[in-house]
Image (cartoon, rainbow, N blue to C red):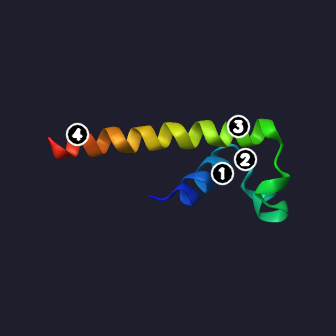
Amino acid sequence: MNNEILKLEAAEELGLLEKVKKVGWSKLSAQETGKIGSIVKKKMKMQQEVGKKEKL
């Protein structure tokens, strides 16, 4: 899964997807961007862990 999809999923989880669609990523506040980044980071880490388990 690529980062753009993860960002969109995170924005949706936070209720920010409509705002992103209307005004774009650059108009989000630093706090909103940070929350999205945190969720994306967690999702990426989970994907890496699942990938490692599948290789075993």
Q: Amino acid at mark 1?
A: Glu
**Callout 4 crowding tier (Cα within 10 Å): few <14, some 14–19, many ≥20:** few
Sequence-earlier tag: 4 or 3 = 3
Residue 50, how many percent across, how many down? 30, 42
Residue 24's image quarter? bottom right
Q: Residue at x 54, y 55 (%)?
A: 3
Residue for badge 3: 34
Asked if 17 appears above or below 14 in the picture, the reply is below
Q: Residues within 10 Å of mark 2 (few under 14, many from 20)?
A: few
The dot on residue 53 is 4
- The reply to whether the C-beta atoms of the residues labelled 1 and 4 are less than 8 Å apart is no
Q: Circle 3 sits in a helix, a strand or a loop, which is it?
A: helix
- Look at mark 2 in the image and give the residue it sits on: 15
The residue at the point 60 percent across, 36 percent down is 38
Dot 1: within a 10 Å radius of its alpha carbon, few (fewer than 14), some, or many (20 or more) residues? some
How far apart in space, not on screen, are marks 3 and 1 (Cα)?
A: 14 Å
Where residue 12 sits: x, y (%)?
Answer: 66, 51
Please state which amino acid type lies under the numbered disc 4: Lys
Q: Are marks 3 and 1 in contact (CB under 8 Å)?
A: no
Circle 3: is it few (<14), some (14-19), or many (20+) Cα within 10 Å? few
Q: Residue at x 81, y 55 (%)?
A: 26
N-terminal label among 3 and 1:
1
Q: Which of the labelled discs sits on residue 2, or is there none?
A: none
Q: Pointers 2 and 4 in contact (CB under 8 A)? A: no
Q: Which residue is mark 1?
A: 12
Mark 2, secondary structure of its residue:
loop
Q: Is residue 53 left or right of residue 41?
A: left
